[in-house]
Image (tube, helix red, strand yellow):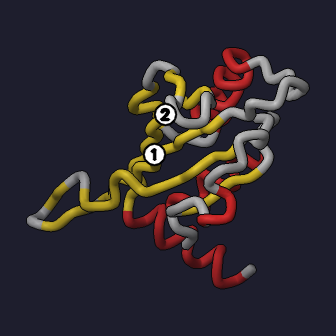
């Protein structure tokens, strides 16, 4: 099975969300000051047992913290609000919950607009077993 950040990366890539690059776990040093690109950073926020039955857990809660660093380029032309609505609908359509959506803020060093969103999904152990089977057969 893919890691939660990889699943979320696939959802973002398949959506119409305007981005230049998606990074998993951290942004490489050479890309940290790329203020004229819209970058998305994905990190795990939750990954552990969720529901219990018969003295054992039966599902896992996966969470991914999404940080969006919007481009400062004047020609980016991103409709931030509509893009974010469409992105959140993409997660809902893929069985993820929007657990938290923080307000936008401006990075004082780069001047970039930043948005933080946390998405979560509960998967039963049966769903995980099926996804592992599909992963290994493909």
Q: Quadrant of residue 123?
A: bottom left
Above/below status of 104 relative to 109: above
Residue 25: image location, x then y, percent: 51, 63
Q: Earlier in the sequence, mark 2 or mark 1?
A: 1
* Label tally: 2
Residue 105: image location, x then y, percent: 50, 22
Residue 47: image location, x then y, percent: 34, 60
Quadrant in the picture for the N terminus: bottom right
Residue at (54% x, 53% y) in the render: 42
**Tag on residue 116?**
2
Quadrant in the picture for the C terminus: bottom right
Q: Helix, strand, or loop for circle 1?
A: strand
Contact, mark 2 vs mark 1 (Cβ under 8 Å): yes
Give whichever of 40, 84 is nearer the camera: 40
Above/below status of 103 relative to 8: above
Give whichever of 103, 135 is nearer the camera: 103
Left or right, 11 with reference to 62: right
Q: Quadrant of residue 65?
A: top left
Q: Residue furthest left?
A: 55
Q: Helix, strand, or loop for circle 2?
A: strand
**Tag on residue 14?**
none
Above/below status of 132 relative to 96: below
Q: Quadrant of residue 125?
A: bottom left
Give whichever of 74, 61 is nearer the camera: 74
Residue at (58% x, 59% y) in the render: 27
Residue at (86% x, 21% y) in the render: 77
Residue linked to disc 1: 65
Q: Residue furthest right?
A: 75
Residue 52: image location, x then y, percent: 18, 56
User: How many neighbours does mark 1 have within 10 angstroms: few (below 14), some (14-19), or many (20 or more)?
Assistant: many
Q: Residue furthest bottom?
A: 136
Q: Residue furthest front?
A: 109
């Amino acid at each position: 099975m893919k890691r939660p950040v990889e699943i979320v990366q696939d959802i973002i890539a398949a959506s119409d969300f305007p981005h230049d690059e998606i990074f998993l776990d951290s942004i490489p040093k050479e890309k940290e000051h790329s203020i004229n690109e819209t970058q998305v950073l994905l990190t795990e926020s939750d990954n552990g047992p969720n529901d219990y039955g018969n003295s054992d857990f039966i599902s896992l809660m996966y969470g991914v913290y999404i940080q969006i660093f919007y481009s400062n380029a004047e020609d980016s032309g991103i409709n931030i609000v509509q893009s974010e609505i469409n992105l959140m609908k993409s997660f809902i359509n893929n069985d993820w919950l929007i657990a938290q959506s923080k307000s936008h803020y401006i990075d004082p060093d780069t001047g970039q607009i930043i948005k933080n969103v946390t998405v979560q999904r509960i998967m039963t152990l049966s769903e995980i077993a099926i996804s592992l089977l599909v992963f290994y057969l493909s």
